[in-house]
Image: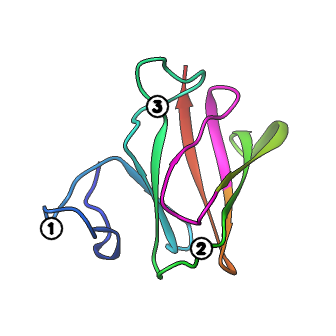
């Protein structure tokens, strides 16, 4: 719920915008969680909307997501893949089960990773 990084505040009127978000480990991308908390299975009343904001202006190549469910440092099950056409931007990202998911993100020759929690 902290303040968004300065480079991710475009389009927000408040210069100290506080919104649920997760910053990538390499600080190249931020996931702004408009569908907070994220749910699995998804709610019929609202979506798991994530706005992906890249630190540098991205091209239109897709944002490729490899999601691995985790328990501490151990993996659970097989990874799943998602794709956001057009690169970082608005998306709905549904994952198959609740828990902590480690996302490896690839777009426009850039990479980053972050963890997202999906609740039941």
Nearer to us of marks 1 and 2 is 2
Residue 14 lies in what quarter of the image?
bottom left
Magenta stretch: give its range. Answer: 85-103
Of the numbered discs in the image, which one, if any, rests on residue 60? Answer: 2
Residue that mark 1 sits on: 15
Q: Magenta stretch containing residue 60, yes or no?
A: no
* Mark 3 neighbour density, 10 Å: few (under 14) some (14–19) many (20 or more): some
Q: Magenta stretch containing residue 92, yes or no?
A: yes
**Residue closer to the observer: 28 or 53:** 53
Q: CA distance from mark 3 to mark 1?
A: 26 Å
| Vertical arrangement, residue 94 with respect to residue 41, above or below | below
- Disc 1 is placed on an element classified as loop
Residue 97 lies, in percent from the top left, at 68, 26
Residue that mark 3 sits on: 47
- Disc 3 is placed on an element classified as loop
* Mark 2 neighbour density, 10 Å: few (under 14) some (14–19) many (20 or more): few
The mark that comes first in sequence, 3 or 1, is 1
Residues tagged 3 and 1 counted as in contact (Cβ below 8 A): no
Residue 84 is left or right of residue 4, and the answer is right
Colour option used: rainbow
- Disc 2 is placed on an element classified as loop
């Amino acid at each position: 719920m902290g303040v968004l990084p300065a480079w991710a505040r475009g389009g927000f009127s408040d210069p100290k915008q506080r919104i649920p978000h997760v910053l990538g480990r390499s600080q190249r991308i931020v996931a702004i969680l408009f569908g907070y908390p994220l749910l699995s299975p998804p709610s019929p009343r609202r979506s798991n909307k994530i706005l992906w904001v890249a630190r540098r202006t991205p091209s239109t190549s897709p944002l490729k997501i490899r999601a691995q469910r985790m328990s501490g440092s151990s993996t659970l099950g097989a990874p799943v893949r998602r794709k956001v056409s057009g690169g970082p931007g608005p998306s709905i990202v549904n994952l198959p089960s609740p828990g902590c998911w480690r996302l490896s993100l690839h777009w426009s020759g850039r990479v980053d990773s972050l963890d997202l929690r999906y609740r039941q």
